[in-house]
C-alpha cells in the first residue's frame, strides 16, 4: 500500500464547486487587491480566532516581520525564539535587524521550555516569539507572566496552529499579536501564498495594514517605510470558502492522531505528548525514535512517506553561521532534529491507510 505524507484530494473534492464559483465571481468583478474578499476575510478570521482585528498579508514570514516592524523592534534589539522551529521564525527577527536568541524546547511536547526563558533575557530583549509548533499551544500563562515582569511583547507564531486552543482560547488570541501562514499545506491553506496578523490592539492592526501596503494609510500618503505584503483578493476569497471547514478538518486530524496514540505500541517509538490545557490541531504528528533514519527508510520501503521537522536546527544552518554556534550548543534542538519523524496526517486519510501505518510501525 502507498500512503502519502499528505494530499489535498479529499479537501479539494469537498470545496471544488465553491472554489470554482468564488474564482468566477472574483474574475467577473475584476478587482484583485484589497477589495471585499480581503475585508470579509479580515472580519471572518478575526471572528474565528476570537480577536478584534485580523489583517490579511502576503505570507507567514511577512506576518511576523510586519508585527516586529509595528512594535518598532529592530537593530540592537533581541528577540527570544525557540531553538527548534521552522527557520522563518528566526528569519523574521533577523530581517528587521534584531538578533534571535534561542531557547531550548521541551523534549516531550517540542515547545519552548518556559522555565529557560528568563535566563536568556537581557537589557536588549524586546519580545518573545511563542511558536505553537506542530499545532499545539505553548505554555502561555508562564510566558505571559515572564513577559509582563520584564516588559516584553509576546508574539505568537501561529503558522501551524489554526484552530488550536489553550485553556479554551484560540492560538492567535493569546499574546499581543500573532502571525499566521496560509501556505497551502498549513491546516488552513490558500491556493498559493497567504498570511494574516491577529491582535486586539487597534493601533497595531492599523499599523500592520499600513506597513503591508507601502506604509500607506491612505492612497499616496505614506506614514512608514513599509513593504508590499498584501493578501490578494483571489486568495482571500479562497480562504473565505475554506475557513468554515477548518474545525471539521482539524477534528478529523484529531481522530487520526487518536488512533495513532492509542494503537502505536512499540518501545522504540516515543509518541508526542499533549498538554491538558490544549486542543492540538496536529499540523504535524511528530514521533521520536533513536533509529530514526532506519525507521524512515523502513517506512519508505513499505510505501509510507514521512518528513522530518526539521532535519537541521537553525543554529547549525549555514545561513546563521554569523552567530557562531557549533554542534552541542542546543542539545535538545539537536536531539529533536536527529530523532523526530513526522507521520502521514491529512484530511480524508482512509481507515486502512491509518491501520497500515500503525501496523508497520508496530512491526519495526
Ligand atoms: C510555515 C511557517 C512560517 C512561514 O510561513 P510562510 O507563509 O511560508 O512564509 C513561519 N513559522 C512557522 C512555524 C511555519 O511553520
Image: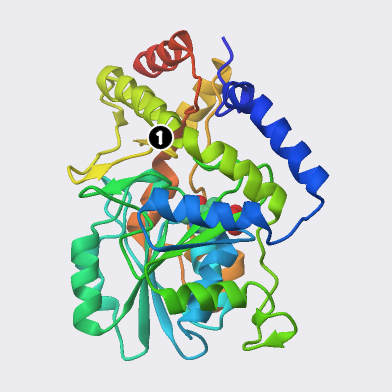
Q: Residue 28: x, y in percent?
A: 82, 43
Can residue 87 be seen? no
Q: Residue 227: x, y in percent?
A: 68, 76
Q: Residue at x 62, y 22 (%)?
A: 9
State how many labels appear.
Answer: 1
Q: Residue at x 35, y 29 (%)?
A: 254
Image vertical order of residue 6 relative to residue 164, above or below: above
| Apparent side of residue 298 relative to residue 199 in the rendered image (left or right) | right
Hey, which quadrant is residue 338 in on the image?
A: top left
Report the image quarter containing ligand 1: bottom right
Hey, which quadrant is residue 6 in on the image?
A: top right
Q: Residue 268: x, y in percent?
A: 30, 27
Q: Considering the numbered disc 1 on the image, is that residue within a helix, a strand or a loop? A: helix
Q: Residue 122: x, y in percent?
A: 30, 86
> Closer to the camera, 236 or 71?
236
| Apparent side of residue 5 relative to residue 227 in the rendered image (left or right) | left
Q: Residue at x 48, y 45 (%)?
A: 309
Rendered image coloring scheme: rainbow
Residue at mark 1: 247
The C terminus lies in quadrant: top left
> Closer to the camera, 38 or 110?
38
Q: Residue at x 52, y 42 (%)?
A: 188
Amino acid at each position: 500500500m502507498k500512503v502519502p505524507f499528505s494530499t489535498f484530494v479529499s479537501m479539494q473534492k469537498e470545496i471544488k464547486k465553491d472554489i470554482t464559483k468564488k474564482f468566477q465571481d472574483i474574475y467577473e468583478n475584476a478587482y484583485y487587491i484589497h477589495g471585499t474578499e480581503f475585508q470579509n476575510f479580515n472580519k471572518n478570521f478575526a471572528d474565528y480566532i476570537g480577536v478584534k482585528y485580523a489583517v490579511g498579508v502576503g505570507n507567514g514570514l511577512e506576518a511576523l516581520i510586519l508585527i516586529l516592524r509595528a512594535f518598532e523592534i529592530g537593530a540592537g534589539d533581541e528577540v527570544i525564539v525557540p531553538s527548534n522551529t521552522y527557520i522563518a521564525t528566526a528569519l523574521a527577527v533577523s530581517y528587521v535587524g534584531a538578533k534571535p536568541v534561542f531557547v531550548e524546547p521541551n523534549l516531550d511536547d517540542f515547545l519552548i521550555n518556559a522555565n529557560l526563558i528568563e535566563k536568556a533575557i537581557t537589557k536588549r530583549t524586546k519580545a518573545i516569539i511563542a511558536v505553537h509548533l506542530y499545532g499545539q499551544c505553548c505554555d502561555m500563562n508562564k510566558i505571559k507572566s515572564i513577559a509582563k515582569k520584564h516588559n516584553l511583547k509576546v508574539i505568537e507564531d501561529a503558522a501551524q496552529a489554526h484552530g488550536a486552543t489553550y485553556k479554551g482560547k484560540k492560538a492567535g488570541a493569546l499574546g499581543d499579536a500573532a502571525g499566521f501562514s496560509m501556505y497551502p499545506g498549513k491546516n488552513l491553506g490558500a491556493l498559493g501564498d497567504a498570511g494574516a496578523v491577529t491582535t486586539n490592539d487597534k493601533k497595531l492592526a492599523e499599523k500592520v495594514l499600513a506597513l503591508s501596503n507601502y506604509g500607506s494609510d491612505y492612497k499616496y500618503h505614506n506614514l512608514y517605510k513599509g513593504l508590499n505584503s498584501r493578501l490578494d483578493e483571489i486568495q482571500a476569497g479562497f480562504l473565505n470558502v475554506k475557513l468554515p471547514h477548518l474545525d471539521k478538518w482539524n477534528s478529523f486530524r484529531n481522530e487520526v492522531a487518536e488512533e495513532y496514540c492509542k494503537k502505536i505500541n512499540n518501545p522504540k517509538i516515543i509518541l508526542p505528548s499533549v498538554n491538558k490545557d490544549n486542543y492540538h490541531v496536529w499540523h504535524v504528528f511528530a514521533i521520536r525514535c533513536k533509529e530514526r533514519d532506519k525507521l524512515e527508510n523502513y517506512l519508505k520501503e513499505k510505501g509510507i512517506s514521512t518528513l522530518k521537522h526539521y532535519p537541521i536546527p537553525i543554529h547549525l544552518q549555514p545561513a546563521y553561521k554569523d552567530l557562531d554556534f557549533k554542534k552541542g550548543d542546543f542539545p535538545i534542538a539537536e536531539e529533536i532534529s536527529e530523532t523526530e519523524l513526522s507521520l502521514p496526517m491529512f484530511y480524508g486519510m482512509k481507515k486502512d491507510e491509518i491501520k497500515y501505518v500503525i501496523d508497520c510501525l508496530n512491526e519495526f
